[in-house]
Every structure is written in structure tokens, then in C-alpha cells.
Amino acid sequence: MEVTQNNIDALNATIKVTLTKDDYQSKVDNSLKDIQRKANFKGFRPGKAPMGLVKKEFNTRVMAEEINKVLSKGLFDYLNDNKIDYMGDPLPSEREKTEVDFSKDTDYTFYFDIALAPEFDVQIDNNLNLTQYVIDVEPSVVDKAVEQYKNAAGKQEPAEVSTEKSFLKGEVFQVDEKGEKLEGGLSNTTSMLVDRVKDEKQRAGFIGKKVGDQISFDLTQVFPNESEAKALLGNNMIDFKTMNVNFAFKIDEISNFVQGELTQEVYDRFFGEGKVHNEDELRATIVEQYKEGYAMESDIKLMIDTRKTLVENGKFDIPMDFMVRWMLNLEQYKDFDKEKLEKQFPNMKDDIKWNLIEGKIVKNNNIEISDDEMLEAAKDLTAQEFARYGIRPSQIPADMLDNYAKERLAKAQDKNMIRSQVVSKKITDLVKEKATLTQQNISYADFSKLFED
């Protein structure tokens, strides 16, 4: 086998691979013998068919399979042994034509195009100037959080008259033009919150009512969101366009929400036994929680700005034509063309540049990702997802969290995503340690505006 490289320019090259008969023939012969031992041909006992018959039937296919195996190994061995830094994967050459006929025992020559990674360097040091945002925890945010804890400790209590905050139970049903229950019409025993009625005029019709009162309304005006109307009626088949939308609600029960007191039991339930003892400590804990969350968001912004700055300062070219061609050869983009791909990934060039820069930072700074770090990151991600459903990390058994995390890491897509997050955090820590950061205090509202673009 002979492998040679022809550099077209600094970013593109063609690899020529020449195979002689000696490179593949023994493998072809062994594969044919294996087929002969297993094949059933009409008129011959199993394994006793003549080799000539086996070759006539299978030789071309086996030649193609074995030559491709030898070719692939030879190509990648050459790239690895010569430490060629390439991007994507080698593709059949568009510059040099490869002609093969696997029915012939002869020498074969194959040509591949490859993209050479650009040569550049990137340093994370005090020459990198960035802003580190310190997000203020505003008193109104803390006040709102305290109210939420009081609400979480509250409960519904029976009431005689409905208010804007009341919870009503009863029957909802279709009515005729006289306001009487429509025979055979839609009905459901249900419940509703008065303040879910968004229209102020319509909402007023549900306020000041008592048990036994009947409230007539237009369903489309009270619940213009069709999904909410379907939930109220317990019927997913209703259609605003064709149905009678005149309904009534007969009240069977009224309850009003009463805010709870901040007792030690409440503190222990939300923060763990003995962690918080009074409202002042609660407020201090809330501030720390917000600071922790804000710091994470600030780090995300710092990473975004780091990426943007390094990509803009990265004065190197990339072989975009080849990379687009390579992506279009991937299975997930088999239904794409160049125009659709560029529309789907408008920042594709910057993304590719960042991947190269990120790889260089990882290499230059000997950044390594251990299995334990991957597991902890997977556990954190899983805990965050549980939190969206109101389940705190302390409520999740350790072995369950561990198993969920391991299941995620067993999935290639999740594993790659988690690894990317861990790498980003390590690079962010490196930037915070070595770059020149100017701290700037900012409100959360103004900080959020920084992401609008």
C-alpha cells in the first residue's frame, strides 16, 4: 500500500491511496473460504460447493468489502501516524476521479479530499479584557419570594362569598336561549379559579356570588384559550367554531386562599431542620440563593462574551466549502441542501471556529474531564429538571439521582451535551482566573436585556 498527500492550499489536501493485490487478496480468499464452509448451493451438500461457484456468486461483493476495510484502515493509520490535524472526515475526492471495478484482481487507486485544520494559537491571559456582571438582588425580589413561601404554607378555607381569589367547585353546563340547562348538552363537575378569567368584565360576573348561585357566560369570552375550555369541560373534542358557547356555572363550594404563617415547621420543610429560624434568616437565605443563581447566569454571559471575543479575534480561515460538503454527507442532514443547511445554521462558520478555539484552549491548558466530574454534572442537570416540578434535591434519594444520571450518560447525545457543559465551566473558571475582568453591578432587568440580541 502506498499513501501520499498533495496539499492544494493551507486548508485543503488530497490523499492518494494505492492498493496492490497483495494488500487485499489474502483477506478476500479467507472471506470466500468462510462463505464456502457455510453456504448452501442447490445440488451440493452444505460446505461442499466448489470454490469456482462461490467466487462466481460472491467474489465481487467480497472484494468490495475487504478492499474497503483495508482502504479505511490504511487511510486513517496514515493520518494518525503522521499526526495530520484534519477536520470532519475524508471524503471521496472531487478533484481526482476514482475509478474501480471490484470484479478485477488488480491494483486500485483511491483519492480522498481532506480539510486541514488551520494553524493558530489562542491564549487565556490578562490581555483578554471582559466584563463580569454582578447582578443585584433587589428588595422587591426578596419580598416576592417571602410571599411565595407564605403562600406555599397557606391553604384554602370555606367562604360564603366569592372574591377574585376564590376557588369555585360546581357544575358547568350548556344552556339554551332562556338560560336553562340544555338537555343532552355538554356538562361537567369541575373547579376553577376566578382569577384565571383574564377579561375583567367577565371576571366580575364570578365575584360576589354564593353557594347555589348560577353564573351564565359565553365560554369563548371567559376562556378564549381553547385548551383551558377543554380542561374545564373535561372534553378534548370541543370546537369553538361549531359548538353552542352559552354556558352556566352552578356553585357548589366556595373557598378562599388564606396565606400561611412562617413557622419553624415551614422553615424546616423548605430548608431542612434547623437551617432557618426566623424571617430575617429567611430573607438572608433567599438573598444567597439568588446570588448563587445570578452568579451562574453571569458566568453564562461571561462565557458567551469570551466566545464572541475569541472568535472575532481569531484571525484564521477555515475550509467552509469542505465543511458544508462534509455536513451534507452526514446522516442527520441527508435531506438538506447547501441553502437549507446555511439557513438552519446561520452562524455555522463561527460555530466551527469556536470548536477549533475551544479544542486549542483545552489542549493548551491540559483540561481533562474525569468520569466523576461527568457524573456530578449529570446529577446536577437531573436535579435541576426535578426542581422544575417542585421537587427539591434533598427530596430525591441519592441512589435514584445517581441512577438517573448514569442512564443519561449512557446516551451518546446526552453525554456529549454534558461534556460540553463541563468543558464550558472549566473554560469559564480559567477566564475568571487569568483574564482581566472589569466588574459591573447591574439590575436583573438590565442584565436580561443583554441577551435580547
Image (cartoon, helix red, strand yellow):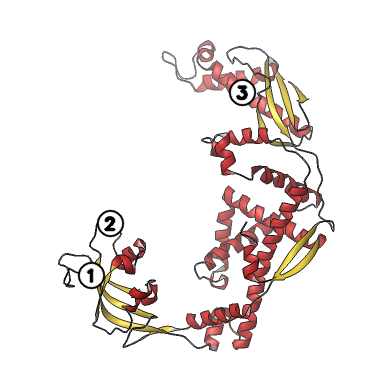
How much space separates mark 2 and mark 3, taking CA atoms?
A: 65 Å
Q: Are dots 2 and 3 in contact, CB under 8 Å?
A: no
Residue 347, position as x, y percentages in the image: 64, 45
Q: Quadrant of residue 270?
A: bottom right
Residue at mark 2 to residue at mark 1: CA–CA distance:
18 Å
Looking at the rendered structure, the kind of residue marked 2 is: Lys
Q: State left or right for residue 353 relative to residue 257.
A: right
Query: Residue 386: x, y in percent?
Result: 53, 66
The correct choice, above or below, for 51 with respect to 295 in the image is above
**Tag 2 residue:** 241
Say if residue 442 shows up in the picture: yes
Secondary structure beneath dot 2 equals: loop
In the image, which disc is placed on residue 173?
A: 1
- The quadrant holding residue 444 is bottom right
Element type where label 3 sits in the image:
helix
Residue drawn at point x = 76 percent, y = 68 percent: 439
Q: Which circle, 1 or 3, is nearer the viewer?
A: 1
388 on left or right of 217: right
Residue assigned mark 3: 66
Mark 2 or mark 1: whose residue is earlier in sequence = 1
Kind of residue at badge 1: Phe
- Disc 1 to disc 3, how far (Cα)? 74 Å
Which x, y percent locates residue 39? Answer: 48, 21
Q: Residue at x 71, y 47 (%)?
A: 354
* Crowd tier of the residue under label 1, counting other residues whose Cα lies within 10 Å: few below 14, some 14–19, many 20 or above: many
Assess disc 3: are there few (<14), some (14-19) or many (≥20) residues with their C-alpha within 10 Å of its C-alpha: some
